[in-house]
Image (cartoon, rainbow, N blue to C red):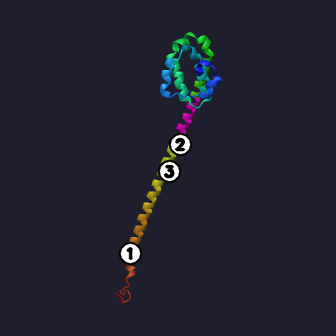
Amino acid sequence: MILQLLVLRVITPCRSFQVPHNEIELICTDLPTKFVSCLVKFVGAEVQISRHLHFYALWSKHLLLQHGSYLRQNSVELMPALNLLHKNLLIKTKDVTAMCDRNVHTIQFLLTMAQMKRAAIRDLKTNEEDSDEEEEDNEDSDHLMADDDFPSNWEENGH
């Protein structure tokens, strides 16, 4: 009903049309061609401002697949809407690509820091074990009696 009115001000509050993503293809297949141009304009505008990129990418994909021949035949009339859709999808693609690249670098940094921390902990444990062994050796040597611990009269008697 909203599309029959061809009023974008009415469509915009109903952003998701309450349509599950797995039914978008069915709706695009059954959509009459007279509503395709309005929906392409709407999706093109929404891609620019919405954070639901995948949702509108699905709409774009299914609109282009199901109504490609109609869009090609009427490309002169629909060129502004198609250019808007194309431009906004490219902008979003660049933004998402940049974000993914930053995330890759951040993950690499975090992995490197984790490896360095593990190595530091491993070195610390090794140093502690070595110092524990040295302490044990020192304790063992403290328990051993030295020759000086036994009084001897040998030298005193002149022998």
Nearest the viewer among 56 and 28 is: 28
Asked if residue 4 lies in the magenta stretch, the reply is no
Q: Residues within 10 Å of mark 3 (few under 14, many from 20)?
A: few
Residue beneath label 3, please?
A: 117
Quarter of the rendering containing residue 151:
bottom left
Q: Residues within 10 Å of mark 1 (few under 14, many from 20)?
A: few
What is the quadrant of the N terminus in the image? top right
Q: Secondary structure at mark 1?
A: helix
Q: Secondary structure at mark 2?
A: helix
Residue beneath label 2, please?
A: 109
Q: Which residue is outermost to the left?
A: 159
Q: Which residue is outermost to the top?
A: 73
- Label 1 vs 2, first from the N-terminus: 2
Q: Please report the bounds of the magenta region as a residue range.
A: 94-105
Which amino acid does the dot numbered 1 rest on?
Answer: His
Residue beneath label 1, please?
A: 143
Q: Which residue is outermost to the right?
A: 9
Residue positioned 64% across, 21% down in the render: 7
What is the quadrant of the C terminus in the image? bottom left
- Label 2 vs 3, first from the N-terminus: 2
Q: Quick check: 112 left or right of 3?
A: left
Quarter of the rendering containing residue 8:
top right
Q: What x and y, as percent, mark residue 49?
A: 62, 29
Nearest the viewer among 155 and 69 is: 69
Q: What x and y, as percent, mark residue 121?
A: 47, 54
Q: Main secondary structure of the magenta part?
A: helix
Q: Say which of marks 1 and 3 sits in front.
A: 3
